[in-house]
Image (spheres, grey):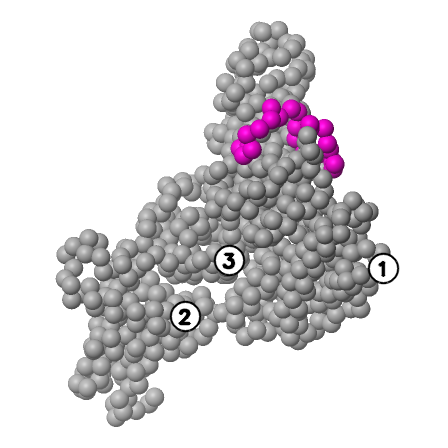
Amino acid sequence: MAQLFADTREDLYRYLLTLGVHPPKAQESVQEVFLRLYSTLKKGEKIENIRGWLFRVAHNVGLKVRARQASEEAFAPELEIRLTHPAMNPERELLERERMLRFHSAVEGLSEQQKRCLFLRLEGLRYPEIASTLGISASAVGEFLRRALARLKKVRDE
Amino acid sequence: MSSFRMRHPEEISLVRYLDGDLPAREARKVASHLESCSQCRAEFEALQSTVADCARYRQEVLAAMPAPPAEWRDLYRDFSRIDESLAHEPFLVRLARPLVHAGAPRWATAAAMAMLVVLGVFYQLRQTPSVQAATLLKRAIATAEAKPRPVHRIRVRTGKLDFTRVVGPQAPLASAATGPPVEALFNIEARFNQAHYDWNDPLSARSFEQWRDRQIHTTDEVSTVAAGYRIRTGAREGEIAEASITFEASDLMPVEERIEFRDNEWMELTEIAESTTESAGITVTPEVEVPVRAAEPPSRPAAFAPGPSASISDELQVLSALHEVEADLGDPVEVSLANGKVLVTGRAGLPPGRQQKIQAALANMPLVEMQFDSLQPAAIPPQAALSSAGGSATPRPVIQSRVEKQLGGRAEFEHFSAQILDSDEDAMKRVYALRTLAQKFPAESEPQLNAKDRELLTALSREHAAVLSQKASTLESLLLPTLSSLGGTAALAHAAPHAAWQSAVEDLFRSSTRVDKLVSIMLGMTPSDGSTASLPTDLLSALKDLQSNLDDCQRLMAK
């Protein structure tokens, strides 16, 4: 459990930040997710894919936190600057930086559901897991991903 | 689907194949098609590298995120507490309710909502008393730190002794005020040291927590008592067999504590209400050698300071100025008359930016004194808003599932819930603001106001009522379709007649808090204390009551 916590907490934390949750709340949420995992396992419930479970619960917690901080701005670090700032990636070639930026704006242009499907998939969740996280069907997940990838593929081809 | 060999697979099949989502048979077909069709292979490879780009991009984004602001907690302690008391069922139902719906301070809506949500999580987590205890202690410590008490007096009773003690970081060293022989005190201190319990400030959440954290095997019990919340912790080893501490419900200040030693000796500590020491507030107006100030805002017109003395008219002006910067809508700010001044108190939790705004808004007003409890924006609910969320582990209340089903899914529910919470919160802010006005300026006080003041009072209250009315309609239009299709019907509203809007506001307050409570039950943010079968009807009826109370208020205001 300690190992799992150490391995996964930063991933979950960063994932929550990308949902717009502010850092202190994100960190607190991650800790709560683990407490929840612990008591779930303690109660003898079976969890097949623990990482998937963690992201699923974190995602839902994150959205609730976001809903509650509706009056505040979402947490949105200036990714454009960070992604392209040479000091951040000294080894990164100019061309590559531009490509990242293009990619970034394409991703920003995706629908909310497309993004969520994509990001959860990149965290290693399978379609059914993504589906139950988002409350949609697995085939809808496939469809969202297809549209997202089709759109991003165009950026590559540009 | 049966003729992949002849036809090119659709893009969706390629995506699903790439993601391993195709059933084995179809996956084999796609694989063999890809072997033979270079066009599809190219398309598939493009997909693959798009995914690889995505992954790289995502890595960049995640890496660009700031590091966690604090050290990660050692979760083991929490784990072992979960272990210890998994058998017990939580009773946060009872814990949550008085926090929000009983004498909540006027400004506390937002914080209370957040608390509700936090408590909601713990309930859904099937949170055990030990975690409740830890949470409560954490909150009490945060509150105490936000509002330090340099010196306070406690009464200490044991089987043989009964004396008063002055404690706190700035307490004089020879602090035993009266009574007990030195060696008796010395023995007590030694005993506390041995028990690893801080004798310097024994009646405090921090000392309790420090002791509790040192214990290997503890059992906890959290309950609501008349005075507030009580945590009772039993320890299997060590000098102390059991300790219980009680916190005031409104501000989480410790008020009493009982310690049972292993050898059956005991000690009781009771906070003595202070009248001479003042909290370490930051006083903005530097004048006056402030004489004695009561701990609680004293009852109104208290005029004994020399010179001109503030009246309720000044108080109204201050409230109006605060309203200009919306500091009457959810900010932890209280206004009262004290010592011939209008005392404006900003409690912990007020962000520095808001504080400056308020100071600026009141800068030129005479007879105003401002106090801000703490500069640090101490979190009153430390982990603000965590909430329920469906892991498979957390059984969701029936009503929530019904609403979700009615709306068509999880995502819709989230959206619905966010909209409702926004309107509900806005409405509640207005209700509290309106109630403040009604309580501060009851009908019988109006003759003390001049015509202009009365106009101002009417304008302020009408504005709150108008916004409230708008928010209530929004709530109703959001809720009505869903709740009606779940079988809800609004019962007839019954409004008692009132002579003045001020007294009508009390009814309005009651119906609004009822709406507020039912909404949070419906959204799964607070546990329900019974069946939710009648919730659609209850909520629609409560809304109707609210509307009718509000109509009544507005009618009286128009007079």
Q: What is the C-alpha distance between the residues marked 3 and 1? A: 37 Å
The residue at the point 57 percent across, 14 percent down is B175
Confirm whether the magenta stretch covers residue B72. Answer: no
Q: Say which amino acid is labelled 1.
A: Pro
Rendered position, B400 above or below B75: below
Q: What is the C-alpha distance between the residues marked 1 and 2? A: 50 Å
Chain letter, disc 3 residue: A
Residue A112: numbered disc: 2
Tag 3: Cα neighbours inside 10 Å, few (<14), some, or many (≥20)?
few
**Are labels 1 and 2 assigned to the same chain?**
no
Regarding residue B129, the answer to whether it shows in the image is no
Residue under numbered circle 3: A71
Residue B497: numbered disc: 1
Q: Position of residue B303 (x, y in %)?
A: 73, 32
The residue at the point 22 percent across, 74 percent down is A156
Q: Are marks 2 and 3 in contact (CB under 8 Å)?
A: no
Rendered position, B374 above or below B434: above
The residue at the point 49 percent across, 69 percent down is B411
Rendered position, B456 above or below B360: below
**Are labels 3 and 1 assigned to the same chain?**
no
Regarding residue B8, the answer to whether it shows in the image is yes
| Highlighted range, magenta | B282-306
Rendered position, B278 above or below A3: above
Identify the mark nearer the N-term, 2 or 3: 3
**Label 2: which secondary element:** helix
**Residue B180, image quadrant:** top right
Q: Are marks 3 and 1 in contact (CB under 8 Å)?
A: no
Chain letter, disc 1 residue: B
